Structures are given as C-alpha cells and as structure tokens.
Image (cartoon, rainbow, N blue to C red):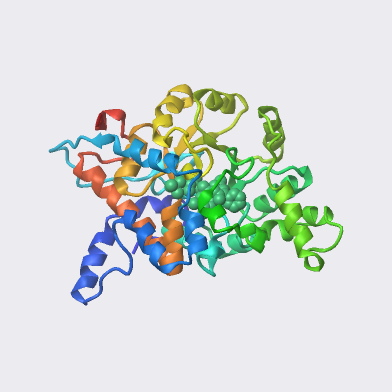
Amino acid sequence: MASLSGGSAEAARDWSAYQFEIYLNGVAGIVPRMPTDLTRLEEVAGRWLAPGPVGYVTGGAGNGRTVQANRAALDRWQIVPRMLRDVSERDLTVEVLGRSLPAPLALGPIGVLSIVHPEAEPAAARAAAAQGVPYALSSVSSTPLEQVAAAMGDGERWFQLYWGKDREVTRSFLGRAKASGFSVLVVTLDTPMLSWRPHDLDQAYLPFLRGVGTANYFTDPAFQAGLARPVHEDLNAAVLHFTAMFSDPGKTWDDLAFLREHWDGPIVLKGVLHPDDARQAADAGMDGVVVSNHGGRQVNGAIGALDALPGVVAAVGDRLDVLFDSGIRSGDDVFKALALGARTVLLGRPYAYGLGLDGQAGVEHVIRALLNEFDLTLALSGHTSATGLTPEALTRAD
Ligand SMILES: Cc1cc2nc3c(=O)[nH]c(=O)nc-3n(C[C@H](O)[C@H](O)[C@H](O)COP(=O)(O)O)c2cc1C
Ligand SMILES: O=C(O)C(=O)c1ccccc1
C-alpha cells in the first residue's frame, strides 16, 4: 500500500499496483464495481443517477459541439511507441507551481457535488488526499470550505475562486481559504455568466435555485452583511443575492492586481485559450494558467482545448506553468497533454461520475485507474518519466 503521508513520501507511490490488485481480487471472485475504461462512466452514471443531475454534469453549452471538439482534438493525436529503452522503473512525479506532485494530476474544481452524492465534496476531497493528488475545491461547493479542509488531513488543497462583484466577499473567501490551509488559488475566468445550456434548460434544472452550491456564501459574514435579513429568515432573497453577485462580467485584466495583493501563494488563471491572454497572465505576475474551455460548458463552437495548448505553451511556457483540462478520460489523454507541454492535468467529469456511483471509493477508483493506465502508456511507449515527454512522442492523425 502506498504511503498516505504528504510531501516527498509521495515520490514512492506505486501507480502500477491497481492492475494487480484487480486481477488478484479476481482470484477471490471479485470484479471491479465500476468500469476500468473510464470513458464508459458517463453511460453507467446515466443509468443510475437522476436525470437532472446527470444532464447537469454531462451537458455542454449549446448543442455540444465543443464537448465533441475536446474529444476530437485528443483523438487527432496519436502516440508513436518506442522500443528497447529500459522502462523497468518509471517516475510519475512532476514539479508544478513550486511543489512536487506524485503524478501529473489534480482533481479539478466541480461545484454542487451534492447533486450526485450526499457526501459531496468532502468525499471527493478525501479520495484525493488518500491518493496524494491535490483537490481543487470550487467556490460553489455544497459544503463549506472549512469542512472540506478538515476532511482532507494533510492532503494538498487548492481553492477555486469565482470572482464575484463583492470585494469584501472575495477578501473573506481568500482569508478563509488561507486559514484552512488552501495553498494555490485557481481563478476561473471563463464563467462571468452561465452559458446557454439546453440540457438544463429543457429540464428547467439549475442546482442553485434549489439552494445547492451556496454553502461558502451563506456561511460567510461578508455575504451575510449584504442581506436585509438573515439567510434562514429569507432563503429566496439569499439565493437571489447569490445569483446576482457570484460572478462579475465587468472584470478586466487590471483587476488582477487585487488578487495578487490579497493572496500570497501561487495564482493560476483557469480558462485561458488564446496565447495573448496567456501573455497577459504572465505580465500580471500569475504563476500558472489552465488551458481549458470548461469542458465545453461555456462557449459552444470554441476551439478544442488540446488544440489551444501548443500555442499557449509556445507563448508562455517558459514564464509560468501551463496546466490543462477539458476532455481527459484516460491515461493516453494525460500522455498527450503532457507531450504537448502541459505540466499537470485537471480531471473533471470522470471523478464526478465516480463519486455519484460509489462515493469516495468511486473517486479513488477513477484516480487509480487513470494513473495506472498513464503509467502503462508511458512504459509501453518507451518513456520513463512524466516530465520528459515532448511532441516527438506523438504524430498528428490527419
Ligand atoms: C458539473 C460541473 C461543475 C463544474 N463546476 C466548476 C466550478 O465550480 N468551477 C470551475 O472552475 N470549473 C467547474 N467546472 C469545470 C471543470 O473544472 C473542468 O474545467 C471541466 O469539467 C473539464 O472538462 P471535462 O469534464 O470534460 O474533463 C465544472 C464542470 C462540471 C462538469
Ligand atoms: O456548471 C459549471 O460548469 C460551473 O462551473 C458552475 C458555475 C456556477 C455554479 C456552479 C457550477
């Protein structure tokens, strides 16, 4: 069993163990509860979870063209395996944002997780901590950030900020996150408003209007100060106030100075697709960007995220850390993103399905399956280190 402690002990983690554990269980007549092909999770989740939540998680903006573009972009690259290169020992550790991670993976921010499982974010966070990968907690979590932090032990915690209209609430969130041991700030830029989402519109389903996703706000003194009456005395007014202030379409690059001033750890901007935006991030003193189109959930018709990665890496790869998400479903996807210059990937929907189907154990299954498959892809393609991959490991399929 791999070490559960933090820091450099993570370097010793053996990601190849899951495959053997599964086969050994087979001797006792036990097969995995969930698919080991993570691309099948969506279909299985669709059978077991309620239609509103499933639509919310799987859905994209518009008719789903960018959800498809994310997959098409990954499928357009193919790995060209190399032979006879001694792959007996592999090292999956990476350096990112000034820390060492045991593998090039973090759980990305996904809000409102109580719609898929009652244990919600704390269960996902415990799974991440148990596997030694960072957990990025969403601003719009179903559980207050202090409770999520408490569930994580010494697990690495990142806080995702929805940068709203109220400065005092932002300041308060940053203070609370810092006090609870969140070390990296992930600021999401691509959601100044929610996009046109037919999956949710057709079912008239929006979690916040059912009070889900407001936990950090309703427990926040600065948020409460903006209400005429306490949250519990007028829930509707509180929900409306939340929807009016949680994001701010008026923000510009100049506003980043405020965050730099109030957060002394690494700041990562999530949702960067254009090289010039990446340059502006570097100019503003940011420590990283996440090349992401929010899993195709914001701009329908937007560029597939992987298609945007090389341009951003060329523009700023030597000035800040480039992370990646949107469409990662397998170990070979991780390989491709790293080969094109990402230092680490964030996992999205697959872990939400894992949580919905089997709570913390389901999320741990997803992490272990993904990283074991990545380790095997690395080895079988003739590589031994997650940091050494270059575009030469790939070829364009078209
Ligand atoms: C149900 C759901 C909720 C999400 N909530 C947030 C959020 O609160 N903050 C955020 O920055 N991104 C959020 N995202 C986007 C993810 O962080 C990530 O960018 C996206 O899921 C990656 O695409 P993929 O799931 O196709 O891999 C959410 C995504 C989903 C599916
Ligand atoms: O649904 C999303 O993609 C998302 O990021 C979000 C935005 C606001 C509240 C909850 C989730």
Quarter the N terminus occupies:
bottom left
Q: Which of 371 and 309 is in front in this view?
A: 309
Which residue corresponds to the image point at 48% horizontal and 57% vertical from the top-left? 55
Number of marks in picture: 0
User: Is residue 213 in sight in this rendering?
Assistant: no
Residue 282: quarter of image: top right
Q: In this view, does 52 lie to the left or right of 38?
A: right
Q: Which of 189 and 203 is in front in this view?
A: 203
Residue situated furthest front in the rendering: 202
Q: In this view, does 154 lie to the left or right of 232?
A: left
Q: In this view, does 354 lie to the left or right of 261?
A: left
Question: Residue 360 location in percent, x, y?
Answer: 45, 66
Would you place residue 150 above or below residue 328 in this image? below
User: Is residue 301 in sight in this rendering?
Assistant: yes
Q: Which of 248 and 268 is in front in this view?
A: 248
Question: Residue 240 location in percent, x, y?
Answer: 74, 55
Question: Residue 327 location in percent, x, y?
Answer: 40, 44
Question: Residue 358 location in percent, x, y?
Answer: 42, 68
Residue situated furthest bottom in the rendering: 28
Residue situated furthest right in the rendering: 228
Quarter the C terminus occupies:
top left
Which residue corresponds to the image point at 36% horizontal and 63% vertical from the top-left? 44
